[in-house]
Image (cartoon, rainbow, N blue to C red):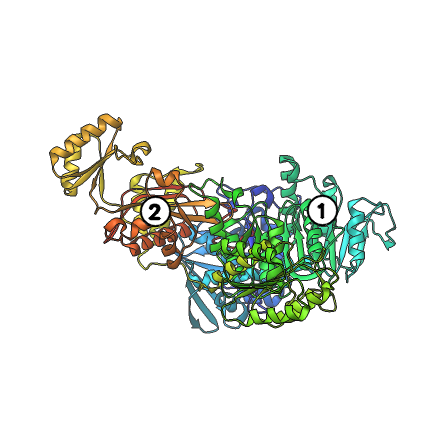
């Protein structure tokens, strides 16, 4: 089946992302009523981002698409049709149209790409007879080539094919169709190729590989970064609802845009005015004669439909919706919000908001302030994302007071489309941003956030305002505030409890180097204030190696010399300088002396400079725009806050010093068999939100990942129990498996070390009478060891978590569990074993032989692989696993499955959220 080429202008051309939405949201935007055939896979529909950052809709084809497909084909250039059909093919016959549009969504599948009501691309695969191979082809309209749509199609076709039992794709490509060949080559697949004259035959397995995942993630990063760049670097802005009336939203936004000196044209839109704030106004966006990149919407929610139609017609690329009245007002608003986002994406637009404060870019090339904020910080090196508009105004004012400059700022309000994940992708590659600040009230795709944030944190610090107490009630058993703080730390994120703590930390990270250790020197002219700093440092794990009280009479030169001397000491990693102005002194001279002492030093210097409000100019190194540059000395009103900022910076530096390690992987995992089993179980339980697997099904799934459960038999009478024991081989245990008996610490629901039939019979009769169980388990005795519990659960921020602790009621009551995000590396799994307070028991407490730690680490690694591979997983619990000196024996496990989450997974074809 011939291919059509999709041009690739650069090496990372098709970063794409997409979001699966409900069928009504993906209905065509024209007036035609779509009829969905039986078996239509609504869940495969998606909004995606092309490599240029603009949205495109991808959906399974419909029989009613025939006329659109015909128009699409006719619009193709002769060259495009030649590359697709290996010759001239001006018109599609009725038979060809029917073949394209009538598919079974299994052995024959087709996707179309839509922009508005028109199809701009089509892709399909067709299973080869009696085979698990399928032939693949796609065609992109000429004006949309080079946007990475070929790679998007390939990704979605592969995802659909894998669900339908297809494991290989084949393609026939003209050898002159270099762009098409590049699509396959750069997709990350291992491709075999052969020539037949002028035709190249390609074949490749579509199973996910590390290379494929890396390509997917790099394209996702590029696409989402470009999408946000369109938001933050517009060439022109329209204010819809612009007003001359002070106090109106449209008045404030327009005034801020003009007053901040936006470098492009600003177009007020007001149907009742010819000018607004002395700027020519237009009745609608359609009437603006020049292109409009960004539209700020400040009209009531009820008027949004008309505004949206105008923006779609005009070709606006981004909407910043300040207006409230959507999901913030209840269920009816939720529906309106979904329609807004769906219609915008269908026409290639992104949406910030609704109910947003707006966006800021302080670059001198842009100077964009499209917000309601009256006070905004100057230029700086920190990027800030938050949701709440009211909180955003407070944050911006506080940053301005602190002298903390921002590079960019986004308040996303209801976060219906553009989210914190998008901004992280942008800031990761933005050279103007050195520190990332996040105030996150809620999370969408937790797995994706965790993955992106870890990557970004390797390049620049990410500070998150999130009180650990807010996440304790997350449904994860045993998760404490301390454990949540540890999860942030292990992810490389700097978690703080307040905006004040965030700004304290950001001021240090934006202007000073990271401390190389935890050794602190304190230099100042106040013993009392210095003592406060020293006490705080020791309480937070720092060592105070050098303290120098210069006395109240110390002059600026004495300050400079003392600080320079402290910085030169090998036993000092950072310096806190304290200045309390004596009577009749000039504070600026002292500030300049402190800054001069720290100039060009690789060690951080912080100060408690008690000389009035604000940051003394002498502590600031600035450029022509007034931006505080590296080398500026952050000042704190209390020494405890200065020390806390240093501690957070050092903790982050320690995380950076740990080498990035790949998750554990194993050669003996049978992913194909596991996939078949899960698909079969989910098909048998269609409609169920979740369902628990039987013990036999649990055993079969875990065996695919090399996790064996100690052999057992289910019995209903004493005779069966004896037969089972003889079959398994003595000694055995007889167990009641009800939850209330299985987890009892007094072991009243189990009889152990039974060595003959008489003991087994008596044990069965005793337990049957005591527990009133319909059936009992007879299980082969495992080597005695330490009972451990390993569980997997989902968290709203970190995604899937694995927990480890010793089994029993006491560990549960004391919440003595350690947690790590998934997937887990070997080093992370090893560290997990040492974190519970009861961990010394594993090392041979009170003369016992140490357990096999490697076997426990191996077990956690295999569980990690299972969780990553099976997005349908709802629960995975192994309790207990007996850790002995020579291995680990799994005695019991529980698994719950459910439908694959559509909006929260971070696997398969890329998804926005």
The residue singled out by tag 2 in the image is 838
Q: Which of pointers 1 and 2 lies earlier in the amino acid sequence?
A: 1
User: How crowded is the residue under tag 1: few (<14 C-alpha within 10 Å), some, or many (20+)?
Assistant: many
Give coordinates of residue 118: x percent, y percent.
64, 53
* Left or right: where 796 falls relative to 193: right
Give coordinates of residue 227: x percent, y percent.
63, 58
Give coordinates of residue 608: x percent, y percent.
63, 58
Q: How many marks?
A: 2
User: How crowded is the residue under tag 2: few (<14 C-alpha within 10 Å), some, or many (20+)?
Assistant: some
Considering depth in this image, is 269 or 286 the residue closer to the camera? 269
Considering depth in this image, is 111 or 913 the residue closer to the camera? 913
Q: Residue at x 48, y 45 (%)?
A: 481
- Secondary element at tag 1: loop
Give coordinates of residue 373: x percent, y percent.
74, 50
Residue 247 shows in the view? yes
- Secondary element at tag 2: loop
Q: Are marks 1 and 2 in contact (CB under 8 Å)?
A: no
Considering depth in this image, is 390 or 846 the residue closer to the camera? 846
Label 1 to label 2: alpha-carbon separation: 53 Å
Residue 95 shows in the view? no
Which one is closest to the eye, mark 1 or mark 2? Answer: 2
Residue 512 vertical position relative to residue 109 in the rendered view, above or below: below
The residue singled out by tag 1 in the image is 322
Q: Residue at x 56, y 53 (%)?
A: 18
Residue 157 vertical position relative to residue 177 in the rendered view, above or below: above
The mark found on residue 157 in the picture is: none
Q: Quadrant of residue 147?
A: bottom right
């Amino acid at each position: 089946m011939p291919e059509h080429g999709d041009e690739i202008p650069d090496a990372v051309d098709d970063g794409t992302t997409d979001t699966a939405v409900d069928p009504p949201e993906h209905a065509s935007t024209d007036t035609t009523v779509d009829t969905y055939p039986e078996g239509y896979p609504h869940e495969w529909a998606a909004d995606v981002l092309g490599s240029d950052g603009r949205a495109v809709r991808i959906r399974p084809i419909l029989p009613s698409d025939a006329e659109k497909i015909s128009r699409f084909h006719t619009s193709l250039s002769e060259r495009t049709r030649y590359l697709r059909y290996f010759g001239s093919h001006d018109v599609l016959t009725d038979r060809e149209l029917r073949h394209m549009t009538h598919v079974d969504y299994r052995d024959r599948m087709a996707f179309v790409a839509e922009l508005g009501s028109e199809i701009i691309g089509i892709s399909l695969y067709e299973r080869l007879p009696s085979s698990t191979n399928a032939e693949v082809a796609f065609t992109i309209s000429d004006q949309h080539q080079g946007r990475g749509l070929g790679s998007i199609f390939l990704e979605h076709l592969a995802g659909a094919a894998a669900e339908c039992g297809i494991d290989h794709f084949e393609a026939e490509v003209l050898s002159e169709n270099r762009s098409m060949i590049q699509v396959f080559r750069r997709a990350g697949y291992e491709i075999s190729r052969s020539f037949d004259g002028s035709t190249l035959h390609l074949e490749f397995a579509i199973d996910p590989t590390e290379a494929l995942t890396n390509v997917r993630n790099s394209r996702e990063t590029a696409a989402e970064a470009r999408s946000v760049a369109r938001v933050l670097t517009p060439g022109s802005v329209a204010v819809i609802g612009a007003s001359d009336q002070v106090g109106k939203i449209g008045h404030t936004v327009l005034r801020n845009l003009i007053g901040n000196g936006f470098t492009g044209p600003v177009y007020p839109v007001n149907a009742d005015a010819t000018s607004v704030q002395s700027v020519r106004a237009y009745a609608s966006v359609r009437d603006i004669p020049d292109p409009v990149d960004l539209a700020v919407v400040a009209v009531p929610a009820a008027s949004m439909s008309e505004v949206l139609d105008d923006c779609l017609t005009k070709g606006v690329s981004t909407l910043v919706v300040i207006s409230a009245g959507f999901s913030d007002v209840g269920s009816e608003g939720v529906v309106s919000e979904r329609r807004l986002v769906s219609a915008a994406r269908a026409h290639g637009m992104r949406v910030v908001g609704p109910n947003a404060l707006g966006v800021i870019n302080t670059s001198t090339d842009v100077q964009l302030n499209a917000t309601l904020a009256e006070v905004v910080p100057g230029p700086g090196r920190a990027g800030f994302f938050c949701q709440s508009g009211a909180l955003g105004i407070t944050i911006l004012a506080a940053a301005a007071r602190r002298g903390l400059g921002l590079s960019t700022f986004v308040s996303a309000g209801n976060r219906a489309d553009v989210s914190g994940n998008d901004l992280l992708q942008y800031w990761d590659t933005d050279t103007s941003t050195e520190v990332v600040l996040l105030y996150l009230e809620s999370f969408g795709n937790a797995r994706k956030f965790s993955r992106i944030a870890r990557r970004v944190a390797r390049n620049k610090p990410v500070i998150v305002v999130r009180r650990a107490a807010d996440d304790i009630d997350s449904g994860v058993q045993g998760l404490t505030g301390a454990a949540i703080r540890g999860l942030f730390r292990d992810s490389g994120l700097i978690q703080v409890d307040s905006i004040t703590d965030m700004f304290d930390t950001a001021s240090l990270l934006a202007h000073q180097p990271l401390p190389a250790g935890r050794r602190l020197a304190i230099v100042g002219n106040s013993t009392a204030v210095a003592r406060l700093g020293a006490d705080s440092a020791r309480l937070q794990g720092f060592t105070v190696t050098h303290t120098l009280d210069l006395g109240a009479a110390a002059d600026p030169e004495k300050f400079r010399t003392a600080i320079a001397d402290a910085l030169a000491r090998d036993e000092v990693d950072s310096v806190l300088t304290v200045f309390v102005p004596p009577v009749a002194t000039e504070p600026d001279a002292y500030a300049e002396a402190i800054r001069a002492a720290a100039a060009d030093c690789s060690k951080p210097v912080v100060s408690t400079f008690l000389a009035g409000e604000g940051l003394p100019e002498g502590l600031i190194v600035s450029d022509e725009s007034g931006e505080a540059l590296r080398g500026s000395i952050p000042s704190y009103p209390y020494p405890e806050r200065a020390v806390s900022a240093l501690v957070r910076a050092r903790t982050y530096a320690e995380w950076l010093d740990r080498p990035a390690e790949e998750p554990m992987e194993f050669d003996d995992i049978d992913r194909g068999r596991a996939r078949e089993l899960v698909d079969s179980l989910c098909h048998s339980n269609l409609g169920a939100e979740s369902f628990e697997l039987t013990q036999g099904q649990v055993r079969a799934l875990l065996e695919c990942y090399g996790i064996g459960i100690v052999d057992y038999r289910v019995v209903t009478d004493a005779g069966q129990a004896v037969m089972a024991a003889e079959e398994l081989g003595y000694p055995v245990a007889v167990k009641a498996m009800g939850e209330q008996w299985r987890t009892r610490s007094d072991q009243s629901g189990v009889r152990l070390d039974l060595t003959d039939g008489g003991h087994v019979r008596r044990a069965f009769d005793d337990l049957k009478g005591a527990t009133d169980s319909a059936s009992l388990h007879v299980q082969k005795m495992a080597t005695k060891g330490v009972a451990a519990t390993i569980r997997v659960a989902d968290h709203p921020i970190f995604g899937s978590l694995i927990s480890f602790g010793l089994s029993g009621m006491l560990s549960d009551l004391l919440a003595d569990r350690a947690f790590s995000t998934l997937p887990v590396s070997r080093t992370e799994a090893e560290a997990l074993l040492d974190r519970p307070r009861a961990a010394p028991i594993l090392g041979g407490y009170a003369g016992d032989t140490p357990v096999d730690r490697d076997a426990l680490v191996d077990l956690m690694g295999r569980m990690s692989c299972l969780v990553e591979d099976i997005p349908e997983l709802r629960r995975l619990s192994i309790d207990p696993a007996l850790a002995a000196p020579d291995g680990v024996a799994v005695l019991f496990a529980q698994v719950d499955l459910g439908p694959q989450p559509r909006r929260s997974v971070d696997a398969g074809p890329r998804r926005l959220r």
